Amino acid sequence: MNESPEIGEITVVNSLALTAPTPLTEHPAAVYLAALSPGSRSAMRQSLNAIAKILTSNECDALTLNWAELRYKHTALLRCILMEKYAPATANKMLSALRRVLKEALRLELMDAR
């Protein structure tokens, strides 16, 4: 039987894990976090870690996830999970962090705007 994951869980996607260490100056999450004030950095790091864990069933954190490999199917399902699991303000904060990291991935030329 082929069962699909229920809302709230995503099957581990090995392709989302970084295969080699990335310099922090070329890592979209690290670049985004470095641009934040110290007070915001901690909260957004927690948000990105939570997103990475959801996307990989606790296999990755913000610095071991390959953000450039995320596709619409990942972000659409993630949005549903966040809206179900967190208060609206928290889910929106997390989605904002995700958007900024993906924007940094574009700026770092790790992905294109397809």
Image (spheres, helix red, strand yellow):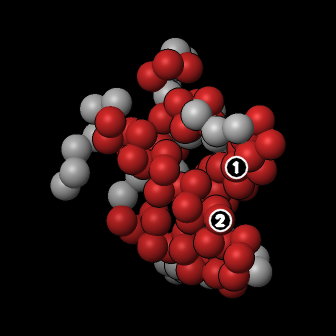
Tell me the kind of residue under disc 2: Lys
The kind of secondary structure element at disc 2 is helix
Mark 1 and mark 2 lie on one chain; the one further toward the N terminus is 1
Rendering coords of residue 73 (x, y %): 39, 68
Contact between labelled residues 2 and 1, with CB atoms less than 8 Å apart: yes
Question: Residue 21's mark?
Answer: none
Q: Is residue 45 left or right of residue 31?
A: right
Tell me the kind of residue under disc 1: Met
* Residue at figure coordinates x 77%, y 50% from the top left: 43
State the residue position of label 2.
93
Against 25, residue 107 (above or below) is below
* Residue at figure coordinates x 22%, y 44% from the top left: 112
State the residue position of label 1.
44
The kind of secondary structure element at disc 1 is helix
* Residue at figure coordinates x 64%, y 62% from the top left: 94
Q: Is residue 113 left or right of residue 77?
A: left
Against 70, residue 8 (above or below) is below
* Residue at figure coordinates x 76%, y 81% from the top left: 87
Against 1, residue 33 (above or below) is above
Looking at the rendering, in which quadrant would you find the C terminus?
bottom left
